[in-house]
């Protein structure tokens, strides 16, 4: 038992040393390099426009669900219903609407957020400085609602179309 522990510990130590040697020899990527750094302008533009399409599908899906919830609420919300019942219905609608919104934002963060930031940064690196809009940086870093996600999609489309193909 003790011999296995020593062998296992030694194996982990050798693995760690190999990893650290690899990093110190320059096998780690440069800090300003990303997965998009070596792509061509044409390929980067295609990836950006595909991301825009995916983000817009997410936003459209959210809008559709939200409209359905609102229509359902409007059908039930009649003046002849007691005020306390209407209040309960409204609270339920708000709860369901918030859940749909939270789900859309979670999906954006999990699936598209990192690519949106990386692609935007790479596009800015390749485009003339006059096209960089630093005022949108907080929206990219932390979109607070679906409207902000829509702004990101619109902006990514605009700057990706400004990138020359060559």
Image (tube, grey):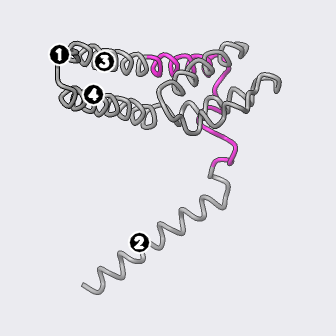
Quadrant of residue 64 within the rendered picture: top left
Quadrant where the N terminus sits is: bottom left
Q: Residue at x 52, y 21 (%)?
A: 150
Q: Looking at the image, is 72 positioned above or below residue 86?
A: above
Q: CA distance from mark 1 to mark 3?
A: 19 Å
Residue 51 is inside the magenta segment: yes
At numbered mark 3, what does the secondary structure look like: helix, strand or loop?
helix
Q: CA distance from mark 2 to mark 1?
A: 76 Å
> Could you tell which of marks 4 and 1 lies nearer the N-terminus?
1
Residue under circle 1?
80
Give 71 or 106, whichever is nearer the viewer. 71
> Could you tell which of marks 2 and 1 lies nearer the N-terminus?
2
Can residue 79 be seen from the camera position used here?
yes
Q: Position of residue 81 (x, y in %)?
A: 17, 20
Residue under circle 4?
90
Residue under circle 3?
70
Give 69 or 115, whichever is nearer the viewer. 69
Q: Label 2: how many residues lie within 10 Å, few (<14), some (14-19) or many (20+)?
A: few
At numbered mark 1, what does the secondary structure look like: helix, strand or loop?
loop
Q: Label 4: how many residues lie within 10 Å, few (<14), some (14-19) or many (20+)?
A: some
Please provide the residue range marked out in magenta.
Answer: 29-56
Q: Position of residue 63 (x, y in %)?
A: 39, 17
Residue 100 is inside the magenta segment: no
> Could you tell which of marks 3 and 4 lies nearer the N-terminus?
3
Q: Nearer the viewer, mark 1 or mark 3?
A: 1
At numbered mark 2, what does the secondary structure look like: helix, strand or loop?
helix
């Amino acid at each position: 038992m003790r011999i296995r522990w020593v062998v296992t510990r030694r194996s982990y130590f050798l693995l760690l040393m190999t990893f650290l040697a690899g990093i110190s020899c320059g096998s780690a990527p440069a800090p300003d390099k990303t997965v998009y750094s070596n792509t061509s302008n044409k390929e980067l533009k295609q990836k950006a426009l595909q991301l825009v399409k995916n983000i817009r599908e997410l936003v459209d899906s959210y809008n559709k669900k939200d409209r359905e919830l609102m229509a359902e609420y409007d059908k039930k919300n009649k003046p002849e219903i007691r005020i306390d019942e209407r209040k309960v219905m409204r609270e339920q609608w708000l709860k369901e609407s918030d859940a749909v919104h939270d789900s859309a934002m979670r999906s954006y963060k999990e699936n598209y957020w990192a690519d949106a930031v990386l692609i935007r940064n790479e596009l800015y690196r390749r485009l003339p400085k006059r096209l960089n809009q630093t005022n949108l940086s907080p929206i990219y870093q932390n979109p607070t609602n679906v409207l902000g996600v829509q702004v990101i999609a619109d902006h990514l489309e605009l700057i990706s179309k400004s990138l020359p193909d060559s």
